[in-house]
Amino acid sequence: MDKDESGSRYPKLEVPKFESKIPAHLLNRLSDQEKWLVETLSKIDQKADWFMAAILRTNEIDREIDVRLVKVERFTGKWAVIGAGCLMAVTAFLGAFAKTVFTHIWP
């Protein structure tokens, strides 16, 4: 996967040029309108295949990003609880310390 200038790990989606895949010997017997129709259907079929592959790749990327986000949320959730517990303990300690200091300074 090539990185673009934004630093993304995922390649930029680029639409390829679609060409008719119908062999010329099969088109020789057709009128101009029929040739145009058959070639257009060939291109539409290729576009549908490309769209499906792009959608599936986008879904894989979306799921990978979601897994990373869930891991980050779990990690930060743990630290938020630990931080809140430490903050309550420090607050209680400082309150008791201040009470002790003030009772000895101003009896």
Image (spheres, rainbow, N blue to C red):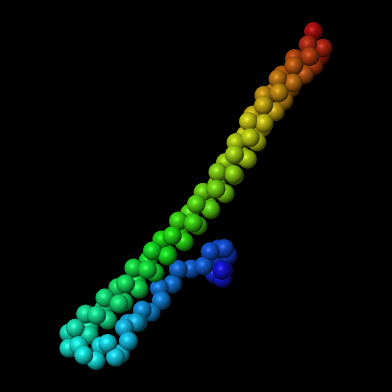
Determine whether, in the image, residue 9 is placed left or right of residue 99: left
Percent x, y of residue 93: 74, 21
Q: Is 85 situated above or below 50?
A: above
Q: Nearer the viewer, residue 92 or 14?
A: 14
The quarter of the displayed image where residue 44 is located: bottom left
- Label total for image: 0
Percent x, y of residue 45: 32, 72
Percent x, y of residue 56: 43, 60
Q: Is 104 situated above or below 9?
A: above
Res 5 visible: no
What quarter of the picture does the N terminus occupy? bottom right
Determine whether, in the image, residue 29 is placed left or right of residue 98: left
Q: Is 37 situated above or below 89?
A: below
Q: Residue furthest top?
A: 107
Q: Nearer the viewer, residue 45 or 6?
A: 45
Determine whether, in the image, residue 46 is placed left or right of residue 10: left
Determine whether, in the image, residue 74 is placed left or right of residue 12: right
Q: Residue furthest right?
A: 104
Res 47 visible: yes
What quarter of the picture does the C terminus occupy? top right
Percent x, y of residue 27: 25, 88
Query: Which residue is at 57% across, 63% downward?
Result: 9
Q: Is 46 situated above or below 86?
A: below
Query: Which residue is at 59% across, 44% downward?
Result: 71
Query: Which residue is at 77% across, 18% downward?
Result: 97
The quarter of the displayed image where residue 26 is located: bottom left
